[in-house]
Image: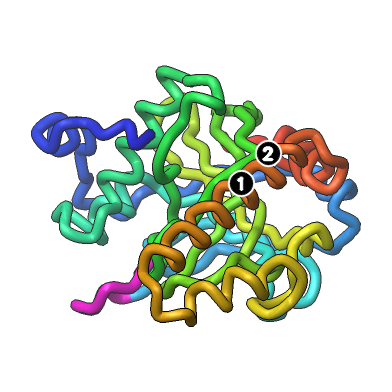
Amino acid sequence: MKYLLPTALLVSTFAVSAAAPTLPSVTFDAKTLGLPATKKIMNAVKREDVPEFFPPRRVTVTFGPQTDDLRELNVYPVAGLIAQYPETRYGVRTEIGSLRALLKERPAPSEIRGEMPFLPLPNAGQVLNAAVKYLDFGGGRGVRFLVAFASDVSPVTRAQVFYTYQGLTNDGKYYVSLQFPVNLAELPKDAFSGTNKAVTDALNSGDSKRSMDAYESHVARTKKLLNGLTNDARLTKIDAFVKSLQVR
C-alpha cells in the first residue's frame, strides 16, 4: 500500500533551508558483507529537466569493486532532496512522505499492497516487492525488502531482483537508501530459462488475455517465492549490516 500524505501536508512538513544541509556522521560494521567498504562525500549532481534522479550532496558508501550490480549506501539530507526537487512532479516528496507514513503505521507485511517507497527515483516501474521486514539502525528506522523494476512487460529474472533498505533518521533529517544485489539462484537467469519460458511464450502469443493472465500469475508466484526467503541467510547478513549503521 502507498501511504501518501496530502500534498499540503507534504509541503508544510518539508522545510527547506537556503544553506547547504549538514551531512551526518555515518559509521557501520561491514564484516558480514565480506567486502571492503569505501565511504566518501559526494557533491550534488546539477538538476536537469529530464526524468532522472539528480542526488543532492550526500554520504555514499560503496562495497567491493563496482560492477553492473550496484552495491551502494546513500545517506541524503532530506532538506537537500527537497531543494533538488521542490515540486511534486518527480515524486521525491511522495516517496519520503510514503516512507514516513509506512514507518509510523508499520502494517504487517502481508497487508502491504502496491509499490513500496524507494529512492533514488528509478527510471522504470516497480514490478514487485517482497520479503518485507522492518529494521532499526542507530539513529533511525526503516524497512528492507526485495524489489524488481522493469520498463517493459517481461518475466522477472535473477538480475532484476535486489535487496534494498529505505529508512529515515528519528529526527527526520536524513534519508537512508541501500541497494545490494542478491543473485538468487531460485529465479531464472533470463526470460527464456526455466519457468520464464512459458511466460515469454504467452506474452508473445498475441492473445492479450492469455498474456495478462500468465504475467499476473508469474508475478504472484515470484512474489510468493521471494516472501519465503524473508529470513534467508543471504538477506539477514545484509540486515546485520543495516542494524550496525549509526547515523548521527
Dot 1 lies on which element?
helix
Residue designated by label 2? 227
Q: Quadrant of the N terminus?
A: top left
Out of 57 and 113, give the one closest to the viewer. 113
For the point 46% across and 57% down, the residue is 213
For the point 88% across and 47% down, the residue is 32
Give left or right: position of 147 versus 8: right
Q: Amino acid at mark 1?
A: Lys
Residue designated by label 1? 223
Question: Where does the image place residue 94, in percent across and percent down from the top left?
Answer: 27, 44
For the point 47% across and 80% down, the residue is 205
Dot 2 lies on which element?
helix
Give yes or no for residue 66 being in the magenta stretch.
Answer: no
Question: Where does the image place residue 210, in percent across and percent down from the top left?
Answer: 45, 65
The reply to whether dot 1 and dot 2 touch (C-beta < 8 Å) is: yes
The quadrant in which residue 117 appears is top left
Task: Give the spatial CA distance, label 1 vs label 2.
Answer: 6 Å
Question: Where does the image place residue 76, in percent across and percent down from the top left?
Answer: 45, 51
Q: Amino acid at mark 2?
A: Asn
Q: Answer above or below: position of 42 versus 173.
A: below
Residue 244 in view in this figure: no
Q: Quadrant of the C terminus?
A: top right
Q: Residues within 10 Å of mark 2 (few under 14, many from 20)?
A: some
Give left or right: position of 13 versus 32: left
Give yes or no for residue 48 being in the magenta stretch.
Answer: yes
The quadrant in which residue 69 appears is bottom right
Give left or right: position of 8 versus 61: left
Residue most toward the left?
8
Give left or right: position of 173 versus 7: right
**How many marks do you count on the picture?**
2
Q: Which residues are magenta?
A: 46-55
